[in-house]
Amino acid sequence: MTDIAEIVAAPETQKYLALASPEYRLAWAWRMSWFKTQHKHQTLPPGEWWSIWLMLAGRGAGKTRTAAEQIAWWAYENPGTRWLVAAPTSADVRATCFEGDSGLITVIPKSLVADYNKTAHELRLTNGSLIKGIPASEPERFRGPQFHGGWCDELAAWDYIDEAWAQIQFGMRLGKRTRMICTTTPRPKDLIIELMGREGDDVVVTTASTYANLGNLSDNFRKQILAYEGTKLGRQEIYAEIIDPEEGGIVKRDMFKLWPAGQPFPKFEYILQSYDVATSEKAQNDPTACITFGVFKPQDGPMSAMIIDCWQERMMYPDLRPKVIEEYETVFGEGKDRKRVDLLLIEDKSAGISLIQDLQRAHLPVRAYNPGRADKLQRLNIVSNVIARGRVWIPESDNRKGYVKDWAEGFVSQICSFPETTHDDLVDACTQALRYLRDAGWLDIDPLPDDTWDEDDYADTGRVRKVNPYAV
């Protein structure tokens, strides 16, 4: 690559600048200053084939400065265009992307800024281009506006990453070819993995560690961040490594026991279908998840539970009721051991409330589950020892020895990655089912003292331990 100093000193360059306007000469000096100081990982990828630049970098590696410089320059060299800036929250948009030490207001020469409305997160340049900030915490706000390109900051930290990303894509529709920069310290989110998989297609991936920009960082920050050297967090935050989410999961794959492929199911003494019904204010239609457990007595062990079916599907409520009834009527097992579902367990909230009422009117055996004060992580911790002691079985794949069947892989991946997973619907369906089976006495593991029982756990009953769980 030709040295920047040579380009600036070239006679043809000097002749061109002499004829240019004072504003353009200022913009040229701004751009050349960035070229002189940028690191290799901060250089705009060559070529016209890509539409997304995914920059995965450690803390302090210069992600913000890179994106601010590039988005600002695109806005300047293309008069009258519109550019999006999105960050996890409204405070992040303003404090980091616009007003931060490496933000837009800092990098753009003041004489090129026509107006900055900090309340509306709008920065307008003297050439008529607009840079608009929208927080990813409010995905619906991406509806309507349209842009020539944009910058998504800390993409992996967005709470509603799928919803926000989808709406942003619908708005990237101006000009001949839109371009986006996505800067983030990586986390194993589905969208990040998907974008990495598109490398070489329409995505360019750049990686960099904190060390790449260490000389520009304060002494105390260097001391603090490098204290995590050699740790899993350091691998992620310093080296921008995407950590396998199953590394930090509460549940491990080897905790589940495999039911040998080709071997008939055992005789199930009790069958429970557990539902986590979709409910979200941020998305029109989240997945509903169902897990079916069959309780049985292995020849060489205590009472256990086998996952004999599981699925998740996006569906609106009118389609959910007949689906649940259809699933309830499924018969499991063969011959004299054939058995139908004994109980439907549904979380007592939002759409689940209406579903419970409808199923009760249809005279189906349904019980309402209330998680009480326990959050999702606590719920999994409460039943994790059931899995850890080998009391949960999953059918083995017919084609891959040592692996679960394909229909169960989504569940295993989700629960072993929790809480670092995009969706946790199958996790919720599993934890409430195992909690019920344990409290009802089917899985007798570490019985809880009487004073730890919470009668609010089951909305329609009191304590059910050591009583017939068929009685609903």
Image (cartoon, rainbow, N blue to C red):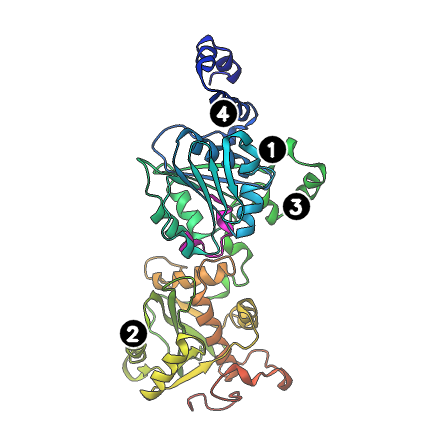
Depth-wise, is mark 1 or mark 3 nearer the camera? 1
Percent position of residue 145, x then y: 38, 48
Q: Amino acid at mark 4?
A: Ala
Percent position of residue 97, x then y: 54, 42
State yes or no: discs 2 and 3 in contact (Cβ < 8 Å).
Answer: no
Quick one: label 2, few (<14), some, or many (20+) residues within 10 Å? few
Task: Using the numbered discs, state the Cα–Cα distance from disc 2 to disc 1 in whole angstroms.
Answer: 55 Å
Please say whether residue 302 is visible from this viewpoint: no
Residue 96's image quarter?
top right
Depth-wise, is mark 4 or mark 3 nearer the camera? 4
Q: In terms of sequence position, does the residue under pointer 2 or pointer 3 come before the other?
A: 3
Viewer-closest of 390 and 260: 390
**What residue would you read off at disc 4?**
27
Viewer-closest of 453 and 154: 154
Provide the secondary structure element on which disc 4 rests.
Answer: helix
Residue 156 in the magenta stretch? The answer is yes
Q: Amino acid at mark 2?
A: Pro
**What residue would you read off at disc 3?**
228
State yes or no: discs 1 and 3 in contact (Cβ < 8 Å).
Answer: no
Percent position of residue 353, x then y: 41, 79
Quick one: label 4, few (<14), some, or many (20+) residues within 10 Å? some
Q: Which mark is residue 318?
A: 2
Viewer-closest of 110 and 134: 110
Q: In terms of sequence position, does the residue under pointer 4 or pointer 2 come before the other?
A: 4
Depth-wise, is mark 4 or mark 2 nearer the camera? 4
Q: Amino acid at mark 1?
A: Asn
Looking at the picture, does residue 277 appear above or below residue 202? below
Provide the secondary structure element on which disc 2 rests.
Answer: helix
Percent position of residue 44, x then y: 45, 30
Residue range highlighted in magenta? 151-164
Q: Which mark is residue 213?
A: 1
Q: In terms of sequence position, does the residue under pointer 1 or pointer 4 come before the other?
A: 4
